[in-house]
Amino acid sequence: MSATARPQVSALSSSRIRDIANAGMGRTDIAPFWFGEGDEVTPPFIREAAQKALADGETFYVHNLGLPELREAVAGYESRLQAIPSSPEQIAITGSGVSALMIANQLIVSPGDRVVVITPIWPNIAEAPRLLGAEIVRFPLSVADGKWSLDIERLLDTLTPQTRMVIINAPNNPTGFTLDREAQKTILEHCRKHGIWVLTDEVYERLIFDGSDAAPSMLRHAEPDDRIVRVNSFSKSWRMTGWRLGWLTLPQAMMSDVPKVIEYNTSCAPSFIQRGGLAALTDPRGEQTVAALRSGLAASRSALLDGLSHMGRIEIPEADGAMYAFFRIDGEPDDMATAKTLVADYGLGLAPGSAFGPEGEGWLRWCFAAGPDKIAVGLERLERFLKR
């Protein structure tokens, strides 16, 4: 008998984004827009808080659920930003948003469970329940009147009483799709009626371009005993991708089990990393960082969308959130081949849409978390590709 991993692991796909990035890494002439992170380092005041914690010897285990002061700060942040009655007793600090997603799935999903995922979506989100043996039902967004759209009635029909959980990522990676409050309320009421869990990934809540300070959280419509878990992360809003720090907001009734699951994953997030997160939430410069980030993204987004819209052959549906342009080029149906050619021959690094599931085939994702000058370089290279 061969020494192989179990079937659920072997069935996992390798990252198509990584496949493209690996082809271009090491080259100094690449304009990279493939990964979902900005091109600036974490602000100094956050780094200094972590450095001080290290200098002070904070290198020991801490509580599974996180530092009490950080849980308090997260609850206060959620309450202020989203006007929800968040309390530290419902907060669990995790070693990244990805870890938060997996822990949430481990708390809820069993082999054979039916899990509905709104797609296209970052592959880690859909693969986590599959890794646990769940049956995944993909429910695709569509393009209507030039915008990304969710057919609520069809979704409710799909969310049968046999469904264990629905996973929603909004603002969405890769499309930027956002979910309005009325749709959130309708989905949650339906799930409440049928006992369906809602896992809402809201890591891009601050990256919204409709004039709001944050995209609305589904928790705004929740009752205390609702089956809803919210995932969030420090990665995007505070430029902390490499720190690996996130959190979960969970129903009070399940909190006694959460430390056990965290223990068997990471035991706890490092204390000095959590000090960086605490600074992000409690130092006034934290909100200044978010505001500056969103302002810069808005400028780069405008430059990118304007440039793409003037090229012809490009379809780019409207979306109000996240940090990506998700578009397709008429006459270029093979997104992997297109992405490979762009890297190899034009020095432009974009993520292939099929990395986000079959719904993304033929599409490309451009992360615009870079300065307008870098966006201009990328646009020039894409235009050369289109004119070849």
Image (spheres, grey):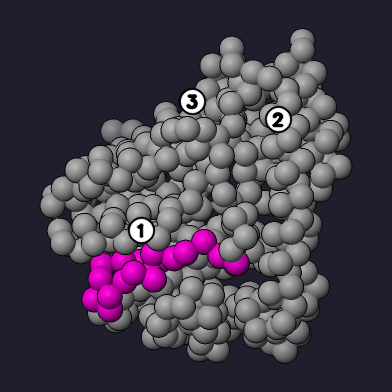
Residue 283 visible (yes or no): yes
Q: Which residue is mark 2?
A: 308
Determine the main secondary structure of the stretch shown in magenta.
Answer: loop
| 105 is higher (above) or lower (below) than 146 | below
**Number of the front mark, 2 or 1:** 1
Amino acid type of the residue tagged 1 in the rendering: Glu
Q: Which residue is rendered at x = 20% and y = 64% of the image?
A: 192
Question: Magenta residues?
Answer: 213-230
Disc 2 residue type? Leu
Residue on which disc 1 sits: 182
Q: Which of these two is toward me, 125 or 26?
A: 125
Q: Earlier in the sequence, mark 3 or mark 1?
A: 1
Q: Position of residue 196 (x, y in %)?
A: 21, 58
Snapshot quadrant of residue 18: top right
Of tags 3 and 1, the one toward the viewer is 1
Q: Which residue is mark 3?
A: 361
